């Protein structure tokens, strides 16, 4: 077994850029120029946690004190408020190069194997360019708030000059209520065909009805209040180590700012737990003893598995079992597997963990 620190005299091989299924990869060829030795890094696993939050802002209307009296509204908004709730959580593991896990695979002279590295300088394939596209979950997108009834063009049309000139709040509320009933009556006349100026066609009729409804909604909002909602998306990277974690504060949820840092006490804590499900272990020989790393071997990871759980306000909001390189061990394959002139092998590795996903004949 050799690490990079002992290989200062080995020349770095030339890199040949190539695109494989939208991935940025590079190909390293074993040759005389690099003494048939290829250098690479194995990955450690990070976890990207994407939290989608829904923000709600409630604003009372100018006439909220008259909502029940004038319009019979019992649940009018009486004071402004802001709240944030967790809408979804997506847990996505990904691999990054581990600077403490760099290796040299040493092939025999005259062999022509090659290794495909991803953009982290981690191996994803040996003796094959057919690297499968790594599937990624669909992540939510932030959604802007829709205009409230009071933010539409119809709102300015609904407010009469008399309402604007009146200095009495009670009088303005009375005028607004009267206007609402007038709009309802006009709409009823249009629908029943009793209006003096009926629109000439169906499209014009619908436009007129929609405008009347928008004006009514704007005036009603002046009594009932408005509710505005939008979503935001935050992705936070978590790096598990080799130990379990029990209800550690991950981030906080602020009713004003949404996701904030774990040290920001303006928000309530979102906790993270990491429960180790399985540790990766070295393979055993016939005697039940750990196998020996093959000389000059091609290193790969045997990862472990952990259950990652997030909780908020006393309830679980996400849970996912993931494979983690740092919960396992590193072992190696005999380099002869890939330099056999008659029946060379090919290899596919998981870029997230460095684990073997396929090992078989190169010609298949």
Image (spheres, rainbow, N blue to C red):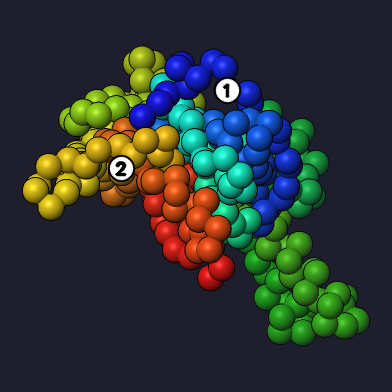
Q: Quick one: which residue is furthest to the front in this view?
A: 109
Query: From what the image shows, is residue 175 above or below residue 242?
Result: below
**For this view, does 238 lie left or right of residue 140?**
left
Residue at the spot 80% in from the left edge and 69% down from the top edge: 207
Q: Which residue bears the numbered disc 1?
A: 10
The answer to which of marks 1 and 2 sits earlier in the sequence is 1
Q: Nearer the viewer, residue 90 or 207?
A: 90
Query: From what the image shows, is residue 131 above or below residue 227?
Result: below
Residue at the spot 63% in from the left edge and 56% down from the top edge: 129
Residue 19's spot in the image, x, y percent? 71, 50
Which-is-in-front pick, marks 1 and 2? Answer: 1
Residue at the spot 54% in from the left edge and 15% down from the top edge: 8
Query: From what the image shows, is residue 17 above or below residue 79?
Result: below
Residue 285's spot in the image, x, y percent? 16, 49
Q: Nearer the viewer, residue 231 or 112?
A: 112
Q: Regarding mark 1 in the picture, which secondary structure is present there?
A: loop
Near mark 2 (Cα within 10 A), the count class, few <14, some 14-19 or many ≥20, is many
- Mark 1–mark 2 Cα distance, whole angstroms, equals 29 Å
Q: Nearer the viewer, residue 318 or 200?
A: 318
Residue 77's spot in the image, x, y percent? 45, 41
Q: Quick one: which residue is furthest to the right in this view?
A: 200
Q: Name the quadrant of the N terminus.
A: top left
**For this view, does 26 lie left or right of residue 284?**
right
Q: Quadrant of residue 189?
A: bottom right
Residue at the spot 52% in from the left edge and 51% down from the top edge: 339
Circle on res. 303: 2
């Amino acid at each position: 077994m050799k690490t990079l620190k002992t290989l200062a005299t080995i020349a770095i091989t030339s890199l040949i850029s190539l695109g494989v299924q939208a991935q940025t990869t590079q190909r390293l060829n074993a040759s005389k120029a690099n003494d048939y030795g290829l250098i690479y890094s194995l990955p450690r696993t990070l976890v990207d946690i994407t939290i989608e939050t829904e923000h709600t802002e409630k604003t009372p209307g100018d006439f909220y004190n008259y909502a029940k009296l004038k319009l019979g509204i019992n649940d009018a908004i009486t004071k402004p408020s802001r709240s944030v709730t967790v809408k979804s959580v997506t847990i996505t593991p990904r691999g990054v190069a581990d600077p403490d896990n760099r290796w040299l695979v040493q092939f025999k002279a005259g062999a022509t194997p090659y290794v495909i590295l991803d953009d982290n300088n981690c191996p994803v394939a040996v003796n094959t360019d057919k690297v499968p596209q790594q599937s990624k979950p669909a992540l939510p997108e932030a959604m802007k708030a829709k205009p409230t009834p009071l933010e539409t063009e119809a709102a300015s049309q609904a407010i009469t000059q008399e309402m604007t000139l009146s200095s009495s709040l009670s009088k303005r509320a009375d005028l607004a209520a009267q206007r609402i009933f007038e709009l309802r009556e006009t709409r009823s006349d249009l629908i029943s065909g009793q209006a003096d100026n009926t629109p000439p066609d169906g499209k014009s009729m619908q436009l007129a009805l929609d405008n009347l409804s928008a004006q009514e909604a704007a005036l009603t909002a002046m009594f009932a209040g408005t509710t505005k909602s939008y979503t935001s998306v935050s992705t936070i990277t978590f790096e598990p180590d080799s130990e379990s974690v029990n209800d550690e504060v991950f981030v906080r949820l602020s009713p004003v700012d949404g996701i904030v840092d774990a040290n920001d006490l303006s928000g309530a804590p979102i906790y993270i737990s990491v429960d180790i499900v399985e540790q990766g272990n070295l393979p055993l020989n016939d005697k039940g003893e750990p196998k020996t790393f093959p000389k000059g071997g091609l290193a790969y990871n045997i990862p472990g598995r952990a259950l990652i759980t997030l909780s908020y306000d006393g309830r679980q909001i996400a849970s996912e079992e993931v494979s983690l390189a740092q919960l396992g061990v590193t072992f190696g394959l005999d380099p002869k597997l890939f330099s056999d002139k008659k029946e060379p092998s090919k290899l596919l590795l998981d870029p997230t963990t460095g684990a073997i996903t396929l090992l078989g004949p190169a010609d298949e």
